Image (cartoon, grey):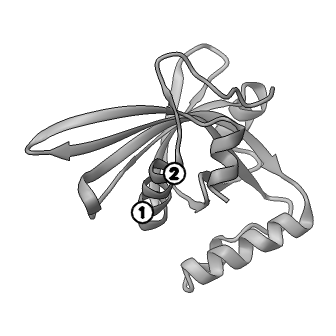
């Protein structure tokens, strides 16, 4: 399904917002990921990720419930809380679609990204048939900030223009 350029109630994401979101994503390591189970109940797990622009990547076991749920329904949600709270950013939540990355060159590129960001965790890089590398392409991002002690959320739709701006 193509990325829509406008989501009702959300502003199309713009350059400044893209930059702030990418900085937050790059400064954190953990996300809570929600997927849809076949029985309708949500499944949420906390896991490590790496980002490239607005896209998030993580590794999961091929025999995991998470992968089976994503294969049945690629719609996911993620929440990331900032530990550093730089520039008033506290965190974000996003809704997007997850897909397995299977192209060898893409996997190698992401391995190098992980090696450069986390030099000591090469053991977690995808290899072999026991793990799957998953990409989340966000469609909606809600950024949360705190100003003068009050939290404020701003919803952005990530259309094709937003993904292009994040490159």
| Label 1: which secondary element | loop
Q: Does residue 102 appear to the left or right of 159 in the view shown?
A: right
Q: Quadrant of residue 159?
A: top right
Place of residue 113 in the rendered image (x, y in percent of width and height, measured from the top left):
66, 75
Q: Does residue 6 appear to the left or right of 25 in the view shown?
A: right
Q: Which residue is mark 2?
A: 18
Q: Which residue is mark 1?
A: 28
Q: Tell me the tag on residue 144.
A: none
Query: What is the spatial separation of the Cα atoms under label 2 and label 1, in whole angstroms?
Result: 16 Å
| Label 2: which secondary element | helix
Q: Nearer the viewer, residue 46 or 91?
A: 91
Q: Nearer the viewer, residue 47 or 141?
A: 141
Quarter the C terminus occupies = bottom right
Query: From where the camera sits, is residue 158 visible?
Result: yes
Place of residue 137 in the rendered image (x, y in percent of width and height, measured from the top left):
67, 43
Q: Quadrant of residue 151?
A: top left
Q: Within 10 Å of the Cα at label 1, are there few (<14), some (14-19), or many (20+) other Cα atoms? A: some
Name the residue: 88% across, 55% down. 102
Residues at marks 2 and 1 touching, judged by CB atoms closer than 8 Å: no
Name the residue: 52% across, 24% down. 42
Q: Nearer the viewer, residue 130 or 145?
A: 145
Place of residue 100 in the rendered image (x, y in percent of width and height, measured from the top left):
80, 47
Placement of 17 over or under 69, stated as above or below: below
Name the residue: 51% across, 51% down. 18
Name the residue: 40% across, 43% down. 92
Query: From where the camera sits, is residue 85 visible?
Result: no
Q: Does residue 122 appear to the left or right of 86 in the view shown?
A: right
């Amino acid at each position: 399904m193509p990325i829509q350029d406008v989501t009702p109630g959300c502003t199309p994401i713009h350059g400044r917002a893209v930059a702030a979101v990418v900085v937050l994503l790059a400064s954190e390591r953990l996300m809570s990921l929600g997927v849809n189970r076949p029985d309708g109940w949500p499944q949420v797990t906390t896991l490590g990720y790496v980002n490239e622009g607005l896209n998030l990547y993580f590794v999961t076991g091929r025999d995991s419930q998470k992968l089976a749920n994503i294969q049945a329904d690629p719609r996911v949600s993620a929440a990331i809380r900032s530990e550093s709270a730089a520039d008033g950013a506290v965190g974000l939540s996003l809704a997007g679609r997850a897909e397995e990355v299977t192209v060898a060159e893409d996997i190698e590129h992401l391995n190098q990204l992980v090696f450069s960001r986390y030099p000591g965790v090469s053991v977690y890089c995808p290899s072999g048939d026991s793990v799957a590398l998953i990409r989340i392409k966000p469609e909606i991002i809600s950024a949360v900030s705190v100003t003068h002690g009050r939290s404020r959320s701003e919803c952005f739709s990530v259309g094709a223009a937003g993904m292009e701006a994040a490159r």
